[in-house]
């Protein structure tokens, strides 16, 4: 008689354990064990308890064990309770320790097959039985996670309308749900107590806005409140604010933005616009995507969306300052170019239109489309095409945790008919879809890869650009990590090209995410290792760092509504010199719209319960020592970078923390 020792690790989350019976079957190259009940004295599968060792007996050796079957059955008359199994460890009679990662919920009478932890591509899968299990697993995921589409021309999404209908593996844990619920309800409660949530009228003065959210503040929010009118701070935000994705170097003025030397001479110190353009010191923010977009009606009032162009100058003190703003795209007499020398009300209003446009582009294009929606596509394509034993699955899956949940929640609460965005945004639902459609249609692969994006926008040399500096370091660490892991499975380009599962994965991403748009330059197949490493790096960077850069500053920079209005209620000025302070108050969103926006960005930027920082997930999907060593190097490098960034930020009024690895969440979960 031979004895195989089995230990099982249960998840530590609330209600991760089970009272039910668990059975195991060991499946080897030379035979299978009996279906064996794992049973000891006391509760065998509770959270936070020392591993118990069970025994599975066989008459003969099972050979190489690549697979186990795990099954749960109701115990006596107790209620069925789901069980979160982290992993199973099997010690063979010759003392070999085999790890079977699971990290999923197991339901009543569900038979789950787990592969031994060594990652294997299809090319190396010689056993017909194991090839069949790969296919079965993918078939199951394709069945439970089907495609849907929000609207024509947008990336495809999961066909689930309510988080309750999501498979348990993709749902928030109990603690996370509770924390999310409490955070959003506390903000709402404060607003309700103050009777602000239903006030459909303009603010009486700007100071009143500061009193709306008395308990909820951050240091940066307070800084913004004090400095939002300043040109230097206005310019700073394009580099290190909540949305660093728009500004680019201006080598030639657009034809529809006829700024002349004389118009901006007062801002140019002892130089001129023409000279500074040639020196590469002039920058542009162009919100052309918003041109002609259908506006919303809020509180029975039509809202207004500009499509501004804003010119900025990197002055002798290396500060980026705005020097000219045109609030709409077509040049003309009724669309004047505002400059800092205009009346302070005119200039402030012009900047307000830029900030409102930036809010929309930030939320719709940079945040929603390029991170949340595309990451949903990367996640679903991974589940549909890569089995759990595939190395790329193992690389990506920790960075997909809760993304399907938060995106489903966003569709329920923000993007549904009565959702916050649809009700209170400056653009109508059709307008929102138009912006997303135009943004996807013009999206380039290079814009998703930070180093290429920075190069294409001509921002390699601009000083004090912390998003670029920190982002580049995180990008490099991820590239090294991805390359370090994948070298073990893809010794040459040949293995990449021959991996059918991998080729289907990227083909699906090209179709479901980018709708087969060749102009996007997204690969539809991989021909080399380098192409694969770059793409997987981009995916992990987007799932973690890029989302953090776009999500974490939402309250800091957007909580103070005059700095980041979600909507505006009067059209841009057609004539200079007539705006008053009252114009500003009547242009800002009404009280109810403002406070709902403040509450939303507050809730979306609270550090969630069970926060896991980049690379620090405890799940051990990879078990090979060489790969684990690569992972440990990555963790170490991220830790060092975190210390470096913290040191750089010391003493700064405006520290840039969004790309500090310790602050980057390991997946898009908010
Ligand atoms: Fe987000």
Image (cartoon, rainbow, N blue to C red):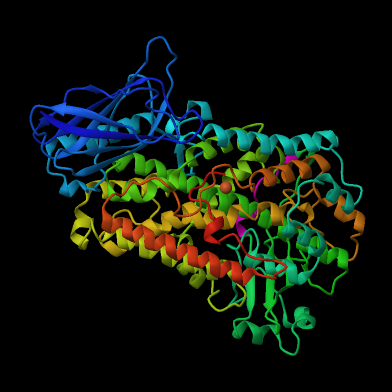
User: What percent of the width, then of the height, locates residue 13?
Assistant: 49, 35
Residue sitting at x 88%, y 46%: 203
Q: In the image, what residue occupies the spot 73% across and 68% down?
A: 653
Looking at the magenta stretch, what is its main secondary structure?
Answer: loop
Q: In this view of the protein, which residue sits in the foreground, 425 or 20?
A: 20
Percent across and percent down for residue 536 are 37, 56
Q: Which span of residues is magenta-colored?
A: 288-297
Depicted 236 relative to depicted 38: above or below: below
> Is the C terminus in the top left, top right, bottom left or bottom right quadrant?
top right
Q: Is residue 555 left or right of residue 63?
A: right
Instruction: Decide if residue 496 is on the left or right side of residue 441.
Output: left
Magenta stretch: includes residue 294: yes
Q: Quadrant of residue 101?
A: top left
The residue lying furthest to the front in this view is 41
Q: Position of residue 545 (x, y in %)?
A: 51, 57
Q: Is residue 553 above or below residue 311?
A: above
Observer-nearest of 508 and 116: 116
* Quadrant where the N terminus is found in the figure: top left
Q: Is residue 656 visible?
A: yes
For the residue pair 3 and 413, the one nearer the viewer reads as 3
Q: Residue at x 64, y 60 (%)?
A: 287
Residue 306 visible in the snapshot: no
Q: Position of residue 548 (x, y in %)?
A: 56, 55
Asked if residue 364 lies in the magenta stretch, the reply is no
């Amino acid at each position: 008689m031979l004895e195989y020792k089995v230990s099982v690790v249960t998840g530590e989350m609330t209600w991760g354990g089970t009272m039910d019976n668990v059975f195991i079957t060991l499946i080897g190259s030379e035979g299978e064990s009996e279906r064996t009940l794992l049973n000891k004295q006391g509760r065998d599968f509770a959270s936070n308890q020392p591993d118990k060792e069970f025994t599975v007996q066989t008459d003969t050796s099972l050979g190489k064990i690549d697979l186990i079957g795990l099954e749960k059955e109701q115990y006596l008359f107790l209620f069925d309770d789901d069980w979160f199994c982290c992993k199973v460890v099997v010690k063979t009679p010759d003392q070999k320790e085999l790890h079977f990662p699971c990290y999923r919920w197991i339901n009543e009478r569900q038979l789950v097959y787990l592969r031994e932890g060594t990652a294997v591509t299809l090319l190396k899968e010689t056993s017909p039985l194991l090839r069949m299990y790969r296919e079965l697993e993918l078939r199951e995921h394709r069945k439970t996670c089907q495609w849907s589409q929000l609207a024509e021309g947008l990336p495809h999404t999961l066909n689930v309308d309510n988080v309750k209908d999501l498979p348990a593996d993709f749902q928030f844990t109990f603690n996370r749900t509770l924390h999310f619920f409490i955070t959003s309800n506390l903000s709402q409660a404060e607003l309700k107590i103050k009777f602000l949530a239903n006030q459909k009228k303009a603010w009486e003065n700007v100071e009143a806005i500061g009193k709306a959210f008395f308990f909820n503040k951050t240091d940066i929010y307070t800084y913004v409140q004090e400095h939002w009118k300043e040109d230097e701070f206005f310019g700073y935000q394009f580099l290190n604010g909540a949305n660093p994705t728009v500004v680019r170097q201006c080598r030639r003025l657009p034809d529809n933005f006829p700024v002349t030397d004389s118009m901006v001479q007062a801002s140019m110190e002892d130089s001129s616009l023409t000279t500074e353009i040639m020196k590469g010191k002039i920058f542009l923010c162009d919100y052309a995507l918003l041109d002609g977009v259908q506006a919303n009606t809020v509180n029975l009032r039509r809202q207004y969306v500009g499509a501004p162009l804003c010119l900025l100058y990197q002055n002798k003190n290396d500060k980026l300052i705005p020097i000219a703003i045109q609030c709409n795209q077509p040049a003309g007499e009724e669309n004047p170019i505002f400059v800092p020398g205009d009346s302070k009300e005119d200039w402030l209003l012009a900047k307000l239109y830029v900030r409102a446009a930036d809010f929309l582009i930030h939320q719709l294009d940079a945040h929603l489309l390029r991170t949340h929606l595309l990451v949903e596509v990367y996640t679903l394509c991974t589940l549909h095409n890569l089995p759990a034993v595939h190395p790329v699955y193992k690389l990506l899956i920790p960075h997909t945790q809760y993304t399907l949940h938060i995106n489903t929640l966003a569709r329920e609460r923000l993007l549904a008919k009565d959702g916050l965005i649809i009700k209170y945004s400056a653009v109508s639902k059709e307008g929102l879809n138009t912006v997303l459609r135009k943004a996807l249609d013009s999206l380039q692969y290079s814009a998703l890869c930070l180093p290429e994006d920075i190069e294409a926008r001509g921002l390699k040399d601009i000083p004090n650009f912390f998003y670029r500096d920190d982002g580049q370091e995180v990008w490099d660490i991820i590239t090294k990590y991805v390359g370090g892991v994948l070298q073990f499975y893809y010794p040459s380009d040949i293995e990449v090209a021959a991996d059918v599962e991998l080729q289907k994965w990227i083909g699906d991403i090209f179709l479901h995410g980018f709708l087969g748009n060749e102009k996007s330059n997204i690969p539809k197949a991989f021909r080399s290792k380098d192409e694969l490493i770059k793409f997987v790096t981009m995916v992990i960077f987007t799932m973690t760092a890029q989302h953090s850069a776009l999500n974490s500053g939402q309250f800091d920079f957007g909580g103070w509504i005059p700095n980041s209005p979600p909507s505006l209620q009067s059209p841009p000025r057609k004539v200079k010199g007539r705006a008053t302070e009252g114009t500003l108050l009547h242009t800002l969103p009404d009280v109810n719209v403002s406070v709902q926006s403040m509450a939303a960005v507050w809730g979306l930027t609270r550090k969630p319960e069970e926060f896991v920082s980049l690379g620090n997930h405890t799940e051990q999907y990879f078990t090979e020592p060489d790969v684990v060593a690569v992972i440990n190097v990555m963790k170490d490098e991220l830790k060092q970078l975190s210390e470096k960034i913290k040191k750089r930020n010391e003493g700064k009024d405006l520290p840039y923390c969004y790309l500090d690895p310790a602050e980057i969440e390991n997946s898009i979960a908010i």
